[in-house]
Amino acid sequence: KAGVTQTPRYLIKTRGQQVTLSCSPISGHRSVSWYQQTPGQGLQFLFEYFSETQRNKGNFPGRFSGRQFSNSRSEMNVSTLELGDSALYLCASSLDGQLGNTIYFGEGSWLTVV
Amino acid sequence: AQSVAQPEDQVNVAEGNPLTVKCTYSVSGNPYLFWYVQYPNRGLQFLLKYITGDNLVKGSYGFEAEFNKSQTSFHLKKPSALVSDSALYFCAVRDISDSGGYQKVTFGTGTKLQVIP
């Protein structure tokens, strides 16, 4: 069974640009969540989607947005990129987001903003 | 509010010795606890979880974790460390968010495990 797939793995963007990251969850998983990982801030929760609806959101500015499609695939978008947005962005999926579900992570998308 | 603490930034252990990576938590309800491992330039890999039942949970790669409700701890252990266990380890807790209704996941700050040959 394929794991969580994230694309692209690596990308470099210029300050002020926007970026879209893609995530395909494990087959049958309906909950997709996104995290930002940086050396200084650690792992921070961005948002969670279930059945195309955002049902939980972390403390990030509105420049960070996401969506989920009917096939559970998800995208996140960051507009007006800042240098501080350079990070590893991790997507994770779980069966239905219930407390006991295991969350499985993808390999991440490394974003560098220059 | 829920929280997770990993008091050690780094743990060094000699190969073949037992290892312990510490985690304490705070939740308002029943704790759902997880351990993940991250190798350099990789995503997080699931090791094990505690939902309910036995306080000793066995997971992948020979790891286990001991749930202690009175001490609100969930320490990760392995009887004999391997050099290949060297990685970053994260403890996580899931609970209902403060706003109510939906689950929230909180990760610890991570502990770097260094196994010395």
Image (cartoon, coloured by chain):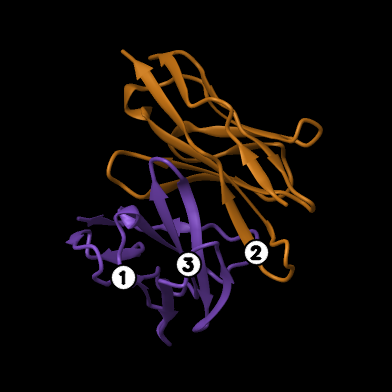
Q: What shade does chain A have? A: purple
Question: B63 or A48: which is nearer to us?
Answer: A48
Label 1 resides on the chain identified as A
Residue identifier under label 3: A61
Q: CA distance from mark 1 to mark 3?
A: 11 Å
Labels 3 and 2 positioned on one and the same chain:
no
Mark 2 vs mark 1, foreground winner is 1
Query: Could you classify mark 2 by the number of other residues whose Cα lies within 10 Å: few (under 14), some (14-19), or many (20 or more)?
Result: some
Q: Which chain is orange?
A: B
Question: What crowding class fits label 1: few (fewer than 14 Cα within 10 Å), some (14-19), or many (20 or more)?
Answer: few
Residue ID at (29%, 55%): A83
Q: Chain of mark 2?
A: B
Q: Nearer the viewer, residue B82 or A86?
A: A86
Same chain check for tags 1 and 3: yes
Give the residue at the far bottom of this rendering.
Answer: A70
The circle on residue A80 is 1
